[in-house]
Image (cartoon, rainbow, N blue to C red):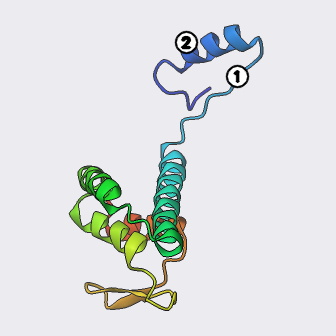
Amino acid sequence: MSNDFKDSKQIRELFESILGSDVTIKDNLKGTEETVFCLFISKLDESRLKEDLIFNDAEIDLKKITDPLWLVIENMMRMLYGEEATEMIMWFLFERFDDNGKLLELFDENTKKKYKLITPKDLFSFIKHRFPTS
């Protein structure tokens, strides 16, 4: 294969010997990054919603447990994506809806444009467009 990456032949041979069939290995970092980012953001959003639901339905406040975890997650995102991109991620997770559940538009101070970020994929595209080194 002309698009093989370093050591792909050895990796392919290893999997073929284990599985007993031909294997194709694709190195698609951009697609993988987007997929992992979207899964990561979706799971964080689901967790935040469940935390809110538990508080609203059972009046159990989990913040003493979850706040330190959110702090760790936020700081890890800062190391990975940078300060500005992390601010967008946290806004998406915690502030993209108003108190009535209406989706808020994100106003970009630099471009003076408004964006509707509905899905994690929208967020990923915005971050990659706005912060290309993230």
- Kindly identify the residue that appears in the image at 38 percent across and 73 percent down: 94
Residue 34 disc label: none
Q: Position of residue 88 (x, y in %)?
A: 33, 71
Q: Amino acid at mark 2?
A: Gln
Q: Earlier in the sequence, mark 2 or mark 1?
A: 2
- Kindly identify the residue that appears in the image at 55 percent across and 70 percent down: 119
Query: Which of the pair 12/116 is nearer the observer?
Result: 116
Q: CA distance from mark 2 to mark 1?
A: 11 Å
Q: Position of residue 37 (x, y in %)?
A: 47, 54
Q: Residues within 10 Å of mark 2 (few under 14, many from 20)?
A: few
Q: Say which residue label 2 marks.
A: 10
Q: Position of residue 11 (x, y in %)?
A: 56, 16
Query: Which of the pair 98/31 is nearer the observer?
Result: 98
> Quadrant location of residue 132?
bottom left
- Kindly identify the residue that appears in the image at 51 percent across and 69 percent down: 58
Quadrant holding the N terminus: top right
Q: Is residue 8 above or below residue 60?
A: above
Q: Say which residue label 1 marks.
A: 23
User: Does residue 109 appear left or right of residue 4 in this picture?
Assistant: left
Query: Which of the pair 45/11 is nearer the observer?
Result: 45
Quadrant holding the C terminus: bottom left
Res. 78 in view: yes
Query: Which of the pair 66/56 is nearer the observer?
Result: 56
For mark 1, give the secondary structure: loop
